[in-house]
Image: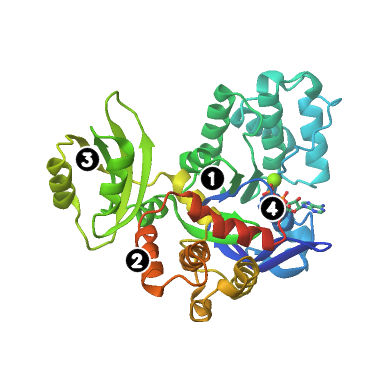
Amino acid sequence: MIEVKNLTKNYGLKRAVDNISFTVNDGEILGFLGPNGAGKSTTMNILTGYLSSTQGEVKIDGIDILEEPMKAKKKIGYLPEQPPLYLDMTVMGYLNFMYDLKKCKLPRKSHLQEICNLVKITEVSGRLIRNLSKGYRQRVGLAQALVGNPDVLVLDEPTVGLDPKQIIEIRNLIKKLGKRHTLILSSHILSEVQATCDRVIIINNGVLVADDTTSNLSHKMNSDNRFTLRVDAPEKEAFKVISSIPGMVRVDSLGQKEPGSCDFVFETDEDVDVRRELFARMAERNWPILGLRSSELSLEEIFLRLTKDDSVTPMTPQKQVEVKQTVAKILGDNLQPETEQVFESAPAVEQAVSQALEQMAQGPAAPAEAAEGESAESQAPSDGADENDAPEDAGENDGGDR
Ligand code: ADP
Ligand code: MG
């Protein structure tokens, strides 16, 4: 079992990993997902003892990686982002070298042969690594990780740079390895994680934003209140009509997918069923509904939501303060003092910002009534542009390099 507790890593002033905690159970295949620069490699380098942490601890089967590095590292096979290959060695020469380096005690010949068979490099074992394709080099990288038969395998973006056929081969190989080893695999590609992992941890800007099973994550975020609609109607007007239905939370226009129609995806309040009302309003205007189906969030969308706008995870207190400061800076005196304490999540920020912007647009003398009326309307499903404003501002304030 791997236990990571309150792990933090600073590179100078840059915080690459921020107070991350998670555990990986024996036999589990864990996907470590996050955009480039999220802190995946840093975390993996710390897990495997290549880097020290600024704070926090890592235990492999109860052994602290900093206190007893040799003992802990024996349990781990690591394939870093750049596989540590010596191009002028033959495959077998290299594996023998790794065998010596790891002070492996298993019967040399049979152990290395078994690995070669498993990752299917037996037929190239006499060739120089230099002359191998990227796919084969990656297999050699995997092979070196397997030397010593470690319980845990840590693979950093193992399919990056491979062609589709090689990707499928490496994925199948990883699945096979997952049956015998506890496995952590990082990726910035969702389908990758979806295809191979039981559980997924999502990290963004060094912060852990989700930790759940792949299917649970999907399930959590999809529900009975998300639909895709295809309707034969003028897009802009239809958007307005759909948006005005009570209980609508969000409407996005998907444009034309079939000639003479337009598609929308919308979300409603949890306890509201808008289908009848939708039918009535479309029928009233003689706009035939060509299709209506409940729509699941793809993992891609889940990922974007989790990492882009904090709408699912509440913000950390530190983030709240930062966002508050940014919002106050942008809005100056237009920020309503009473809205200040509600910045617990991105939607709360969005709401406060859009209300304040409305008021700014109307000028200070605008009657309160009109401002309220306006904002109530624009609150409902907005056009998406507004929604992105607040989180982006928050990001800027975060000092990140996205
Ligand atoms: P990922 O593997 O998710 O792409 P990394 O762990 O490589 O992310 O990087 C996390 C952040 O730390 C990035 O912003 C990166 O620029 C920064 N970083 C990584 N390594 C170093 C380093 N040696 N010195 C300074 N900054 C670094
Ligand atoms: Mg990386």
Q: Which of marks 3 and 1 is nearer the N terminus?
A: 1
Dot label at residue 256: none
For the residue carrying disc 2, how many other residues have a C-alpha within 10 Å: few (<14), some (14-19), or many (20+)? few
Residue found at x 62% / y 51%: 152
Mark 1, residue position: 180
Mark 4, residue position: 44
Q: Which of marks 1 and 2 is in front?
A: 2
Q: CA–CA distance between discs 2 and 4?
A: 52 Å
Residue found at x 62% / y 34%: 159
Is ligand 1 closer than 8 angstroms to the Cβ of mark 4? yes
Q: Earlier in the sequence, mark 3 or mark 2?
A: 3
Task: Name the kind of residue labelled 4 in the image.
Answer: Met
Marks 1/4 in contact by CB < 8 Å: the verdict is no
Dot label at residue 292: 3
Q: In this view, does 79 lie to the left or right of 239?
A: right
Q: Which of marks 2 and 4 is in front?
A: 2
Q: Is mark 4 on a helix, strand or loop?
A: helix
Q: CA–CA distance between discs 3 and 1?
A: 45 Å
Marks 2/4 in contact by CB < 8 Å: the verdict is no
Q: CA–CA distance between discs 1 and 4?
A: 20 Å
Q: Earlier in the sequence, mark 1 or mark 2?
A: 1
Residue reaching furthest to the right: 88
Q: Earlier in the sequence, mark 1 or mark 4?
A: 4
Mark 2, residue position: 373
